Image (cartoon, rainbow, N blue to C red):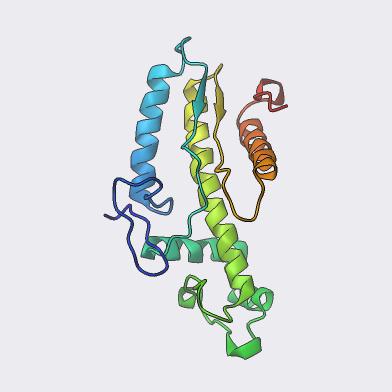
């Protein structure tokens, strides 16, 4: 249960559905990384394996678990150099008396609540995207330790309301190139042309 994603309305997703696990869960990450590393050790030099797919259509998660909230606070501490005044200034919290005196006072923004601080929502969306990116990047690093001559990729969901499949596919290819180039030499990166 501690690895399951919690929606804003309090609904905890159940095992058996797709994308039900929280990227903010340390236990989920630990168990995932163990499994991925074991697979990479076993198949990393297998000539029958041409490549690896990370996850399946990984999506940015808007998780409302206590671990996600704590990780969001840690993200904000790092982003604002442990200085709550910098966060208050960036978020414009003087308006409507929203000023914080501690990072521990910050909660996850409620997307359905009217008049939430737009800067807080933006930072939360950036945090959520970073959680997905970090989870995929760590998988890529683990696989690359053992799979020197195999490509690594992922696929993005193509059915999104605000982004056409063509644009999403292009973004996916750019992100994939960045991940792979960070891990391998440019000349060894997967041809994404």
How many marks can you see? 0
Residue 78 visible to the viewer: no
Residue at image position (38%, 63%) is 65
23 over 90 or under it: above or below: above
Q: Residue at x 68, y 23 (%)?
A: 191
- Pinpoint residue 2: horizontal percent, then vertical percent: 29, 55
Q: Quick check: 15 above or below 42? A: below
Residue 177 visible = yes
> What is the x, y in percent for residue 148?
54, 19
Residue 89, image quadrant: bottom right
**Furthest-top residue in this view:** 47
Closer-to-camera residue (12/70): 12
* Coordinates of residue 14 in the picture (x, y in percent): 29, 53
Q: Quadrant of the N terminus?
A: bottom left
Across and down, in percent, residue 59 comes to: 51, 48
Q: Quadrant of the C terminus?
A: top right
* In the depicted structure, whether residue 1 falls above or below residue 116: above
Question: In the displayed image of the protein, which residue is found farthest to the left?
Answer: 1
Report the front residue among 109 and 31.
Answer: 109
Identify which residue is drawn at 37% across, 49% down.
21
Query: Looking at the image, which residue is at 49% across and 39% down?
Result: 138
């Amino acid at each position: 249960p501690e690895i399951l994603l919690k929606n804003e309305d309090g609904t905890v997703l159940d095992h058996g559905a797709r994308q039900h696990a929280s990227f903010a869960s340390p236990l989920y990450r630990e168990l995932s990384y163990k499994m991925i590393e074991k697979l990479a050790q076993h198949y990393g030099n297998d000539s029958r394996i041409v490549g690896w797919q990370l996850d399946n259509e990984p999506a940015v998660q808007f998780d409302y678990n206590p671990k996600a909230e704590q990780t969001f606070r840690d993200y904000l501490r790092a982003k604002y150099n442990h200085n709550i005044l910098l966060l208050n200034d960036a978020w414009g919290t003087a308006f409507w008396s929203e000023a914080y005196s501690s990072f521990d006072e910050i909660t996850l923004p409620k997307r359905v609540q009217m008049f939430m601080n737009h800067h807080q929502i933006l930072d939360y969306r950036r945090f959520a995207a970073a959680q997905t990116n970090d989870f995929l990047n760590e998988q890529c690093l683990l696989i690359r330790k053992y799979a020197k001559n195999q490509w690594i990729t992922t696929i993005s969901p193509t059915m999104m309301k605000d982004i056409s499949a063509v644009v999403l596919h292009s973004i996916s290819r750019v992100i994939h190139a960045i991940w792979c180039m960070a891990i391998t030499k440019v000349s060894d990166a997967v041809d994404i042309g």
